[in-house]
Image (cartoon, helix red, strand yellow):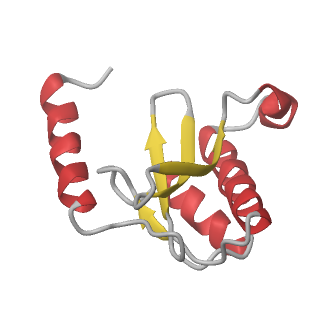
């Protein structure tokens, strides 16, 4: 479990990033959150305040695909899935919001697999 100082520092970084990254209808924000066990991704239009698409490792229909895979491999599946759902809505380009996390490991895996699936980040 992360300490209070670690969590506070991440939230400060996230607020700083959110001051610069704004999601619009033409270029929504791809927001990633990473917990110790799961990863979540959302495509958000900040102008309207709506979540347009989402994917996470908690979805029941993904349980069979995620079973026995390491966390980075699970993150790659989530990245491909969120890209597929975004493309289904006609979204080709997104602004990536790493949520105050370092751009490596699972966060990087989500971004790179979304790129491979056809999203422009």
At x 46%, y 39%, the residue is: 34
Q: Nearer the viewer, residue 22 or 64?
A: 22
Q: Quick check: 24 above or below 76?
A: below
Location of the N terminus (image quadrant): top left
The residue lying at 44 percent from left, 50 percent from top is 49
Determine which quarter of the picture holds residue 59: top right
Question: In this rendering, would 86 be left or right of 52?
Answer: right
- Residue 24: give x, y in percent of width and height: 45, 69
Above or below: residue 35 compared with residue 77: above
Whole-percent x and y of residue 30? 51, 59
Name the residue at the front extreme: 48
Q: Residue sitting at 59 percent across and 79 percent down?
A: 120
Camera-side residue of 21 and 104: 21
Judging depth in this view, the residue of 42 and 64 nearest the camera is 42
Name, please, the residue furthest toward the top.
Answer: 1
Q: Please identify the quarter of the rendering in which residue 88 is found.
A: bottom right
Task: Note whether 57 is above or below 104 in the view shown.
Answer: above
């Amino acid at each position: 479990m992360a300490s209070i100082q670690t969590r506070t520092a991440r939230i400060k970084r996230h607020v700083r990033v959110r001051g610069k990254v704004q999601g619009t209808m033409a270029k929504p924000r791809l927001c990633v959150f990473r917990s110790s066990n799961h990863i979540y991704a959302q495509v958000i239009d900040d102008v309207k305040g709506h979540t347009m698409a989402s994917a996470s490792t908690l979805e029941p229909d993904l349980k069979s695909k995620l079973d026995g895979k390491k966390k980075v491999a699970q993150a790659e599946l989530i990245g491909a899935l969120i890209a597929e759902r975004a493309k289904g809505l006609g979204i080709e380009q997104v602004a990536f919001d790493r949520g105050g996390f370092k751009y490596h490991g699972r966060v990087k895996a989500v971004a790179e697999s979304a790129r491979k699936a056809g999203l422009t980040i």
